[in-house]
Amino acid sequence: TTAVAGYDPSKEYHDYSTVQIWVGKNKAGVGDVIGPILYRTIWGLLNDYCPHNGDKCTLNNRDKWPCFKTHTLGVWPYPVEETSTCINEITAEYDNEQIRSLLIGAIAGTFEALTNQLLDDVSGVRTNCYKVGENKGCNVADVVRVINMRKHNDRQDFMYVGLSNFDTHYGPWDCCAGGKRELFDKAIDGLGGVFGQKFTRDSRCIINRWEACK
């Protein structure tokens, strides 16, 4: 692919795999809503927003951002605070109900997988997960994009979802560190049978066009 100014390969299908997953380099705090609870939360919000009887959905009005309550850490001395994490972007097209559910599951599963990290430890190793009071809290990517090419025509099925929490800035996020790509690979692998064809997937961090993790 020719690199041109402004070109973003994470927003189109490439024929080297059945499904492509792109994960953002910036962070969004999801606090103590993690693991299966995060999966169900994201799945529910996307399921409500993206209609069963349609073939696309778009979110571009901040007044309508779907949000969920969570607990995060504030500024020094890092008190536990109730804040909101919101879906600030949805751009999706899908061929049928099965694909719609697949894309929602892939997005929710990827966000969930990013919270399957160990906590920060006393040796100084930082991860994207840390103590929030007596609970575990995490940062995740600010965007996940999943793209698939339809078998019967040359159109793409895709879903791009962004998250934000403007009330917390605590903790790190590094898409390339700590084996995160292996985590979201596993989240997608369980969905392979839905495609009814030889399933391959490719996962990448959104850095700068085709720049890869080192």
Image (spheres, rainbow, N blue to C red):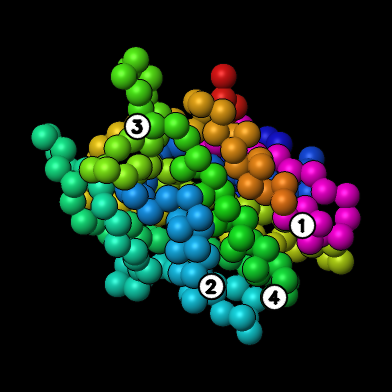
Q: Is mark 3 on a helix, strand or loop?
A: loop
Comparing labels 1 and 2, the label whose residue is closer to the camera? 2
Q: Name the residue under label 2.
A: 47
Residue occupying image coordinates x 48% and y 75%: 49
Q: Residue 30, percent across and down? A: 36, 50
Q: Is residue 207 visible?
A: no
Q: Residue 86, percent across and down? A: 35, 60
Q: Mark 1 points at which residue?
A: 149
Q: In this view, does 202 lie above or below 151?
A: above
Q: Can residue 25 be seen in this view?
A: yes
Q: Mark 3 points at which residue?
A: 172
Q: Residue 144, percent across and down? A: 53, 49
Q: Give the range drawn in magenta.
A: 191-210
Q: In this view, does 172 lie above or below 193?
A: above
Residue occupying image coordinates x 72% and y 47%: 189
Comparing labels 4 and 1, the label whose residue is closer to the camera? 4
Q: Mark 4 points at which residue?
A: 97
Amino acid type shown at disc 1: Met
Distance in Å between CA atoms under marks 3 and 4:
37 Å
